């Protein structure tokens, strides 16, 4: 769907920043809405969608269990 959204989970990404998550959310909202930059009357809805999708993405990434992650050192658990 969005070719410029990169995979953010191990082993495809060693470090994922808040900026990475937000960029992916922004690309998703742009694709779904069809707007690169929304008109002023749609800006609040656009921004809210980006924030909610970024939050859902962070939650997803934190919840994923990757087989073999502990053996490879990719597990973020203390």
Image (spheres, helix red, strand yellow):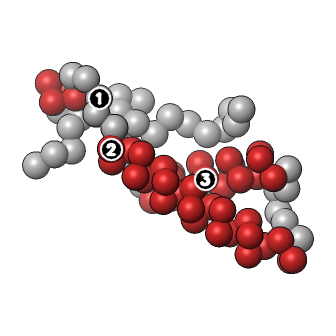
Above or below: residue 17 compared with residue 67:
below
Residue 25 image label? 3
Q: Quadrant of the N terminus?
A: top right
Task: Locate residue 2: give its quadrant.
Answer: top right
Distance, label 3 to label 2, CA atoms, is: 18 Å
Residue at position x 35%, y 33% in the image: 10
Classed neighbour count for the residue bearing mark 2: other residues with Cα under 10 Å, few (<14), some (14–19), many (≥20): few
Task: Locate residue 39: give its quadrant.
Answer: bottom right
Identify residue for label 1.
Answer: 66
Residue 68 shows up from this direction = yes
Do the numbered discs 3 and 1 sit on residues whose CB atoms are within 8 Å? no
Going by the image, does 54 lie left or right of 30?
A: left
Dot 1: element: loop
Dot 2: element: helix
Going by the image, does 65 lie left or right of 71?
A: right
Going by the image, does 6 lie left or right of 27?
A: left
Classed neighbour count for the residue bearing mark 1: other residues with Cα under 10 Å, few (<14), some (14–19), many (≥20): few
Residue 3 image label? none
| Residue 59, position as x, y percentages in the image | 40, 52
Distance, label 3 to label 1, CA atoms, is: 22 Å
Residue at position x 19%, y 26% in the image: 72
| Residue 40, position as x, y percentages in the image | 86, 77
Residue 15 shows up from this direction = no
Residue at position x 25%, y 23% in the image: 67
Do the numbered discs 3 and 2 sit on residues whose CB atoms are within 8 Å? no
Residue 63 image label? 2
Distance, label 2 to label 1, CA atoms, is: 10 Å
Above or below: residue 35 compared with residue 61:
below
Which numbered disc, 3 or 2, marks the residue that appears first in the sequence? 3
Task: Locate residue 17: give its quadrant.
Answer: bottom left
């Amino acid at each position: 769907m969005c070719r410029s959204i990169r995979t953010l989970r191990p082993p495809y990404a060693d470090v994922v920043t808040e900026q990475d998550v937000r960029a992916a959310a922004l690309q998703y909202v742009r694709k779904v809405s069809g707007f690169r930059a929304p008109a002023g009357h749609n800006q609040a809805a656009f921004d809210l969608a980006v924030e909610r999708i970024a939050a859902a993405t962070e939650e997803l990434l934190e919840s994923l269990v990757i087989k073999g992650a502990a053996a490879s050192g990719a597990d973020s658990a203390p």
